[in-house]
Amino acid sequence: MRRTSAESRGFAARITRQIDDAWRAPLVRLAASGGLVLTLAAALALSPWLRVRQVSWTGALQLDDSRCAAVEAQLLGRPLFLVPQAGIAARLGVGKSQLDIGFHRHVPGNLEVRVRPRRAIAQIADGVAIDAHGRVLPAEHCLPGLPRLDGFVLDDKGKRLDGAGRSLLAVLAPCFSVPTLSPSAVRCGADGAVELVLADSGSHVRLDAARAETQLLKLRVFEASLGAEPLPGSIDLRFRDQVVVRDGGGRDAKRRSR
């Protein structure tokens, strides 16, 4: 039987409504479930089980203890996943343009605050700030607590480290971005002996400038092998195929462990 055009239009409209109804119900259910998910996520974020119970500070920059304590007092007890990063630099008394601050949240209640200078990587003995390429920076970049480089000297023009210092700094630079291996001090002797004091643990690490790249790779492998165990107080990397360690000594860091 042939349908008239009016019947055909009516039939098409009924089919369209049926298709719309078939799709509308799942969409409504999906929207409702999405609202439920958001509600549950909000409830979880505000749960008393996910509150900041510990604040740990990592990075090579040694911060003033009293300022850190004041910031911690404001952060403790707040929802772990809802704590904003805004304003932390100001509370530390340092310009935002000079620091890079990042939060790393560890369930259930540890808030790790990683603090790194934006341009300066360290300071040499007379308080001159330098960047990762060994270039001298303006005085405003010499922040209190920058890692100290002892035994490093500037070139004849006084605008950057000498060749040996730049080469060693280039090898050491990757360590400055690893919280557990960031040094608070680097001491370089005339005989090429190098000693790092790690900011996170206070451990003393000894190596040779001529083989620093290979020996620092050994340090990374050794540190990874420890898992959650703390680094020993003294680590000597100067022996071939060995890592000589001793406990005690060097654990002078005041920061909290991660």
Image (cartoon, rainbow, N blue to C red):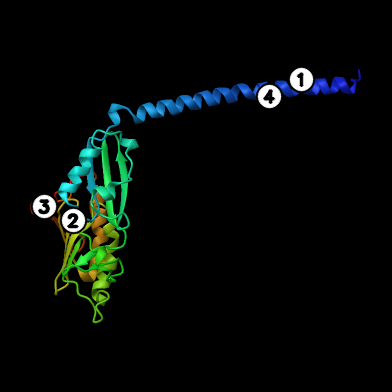
Q: Quarter of the image holding residue 37?
A: top left
Instruction: Give percent across and percent down for residue 97.
Output: 32, 57
Label ID, residue 20: 4
Q: Which residue is mark 3?
A: 252
Report, in whole angstroms, how far the alpha carbon at label 2 lies from the one at label 3: 10 Å
Q: Quadrant of the N terminus?
A: top right
* Front-most of residues 210 and 240: 210
Label 4 Cα crowd, 10 Å radius (few <14 / some 14-19 / many 20+): few
Q: CA distance from mark 3 to mark 4?
A: 70 Å
Rendered view: 236 above or below 188? above
Q: Position of residue 248 (x, y in %)?
A: 8, 51
Q: Residue placed farthest to the left in the image?
A: 249
The residue indicated by pointer 2 is 198
Residue 188: quarter of image: bottom left
Mark 4: amino acid = Asp
Which residue occupies the foreground of this view, 73 or 147?
73
Marks 4 & 2, CB-CB < 8 Å contact? no
Residue depicted at 18% across the width and 43% down the height: 69
For discs 4 and 2, the disc positioned in front in the rendered view: 4
149 horizontally vs 213: left or right: left
Give the residue displayed 37% in from the left and 26% down from the top.
43
Quarter in which the C terminus is drawn: top left
Q: Earlier in the sequence, mark 2 or mark 3?
A: 2
The answer to which of marks 1 and 2 sits earlier in the sequence is 1
Q: Earlier in the sequence, mark 4 or mark 2?
A: 4
- Of the two numbered discs 1 and 2 in the rendering, the one whose residue sits closer to the viewer: 1
> What residue would you read off at disc 1?
14
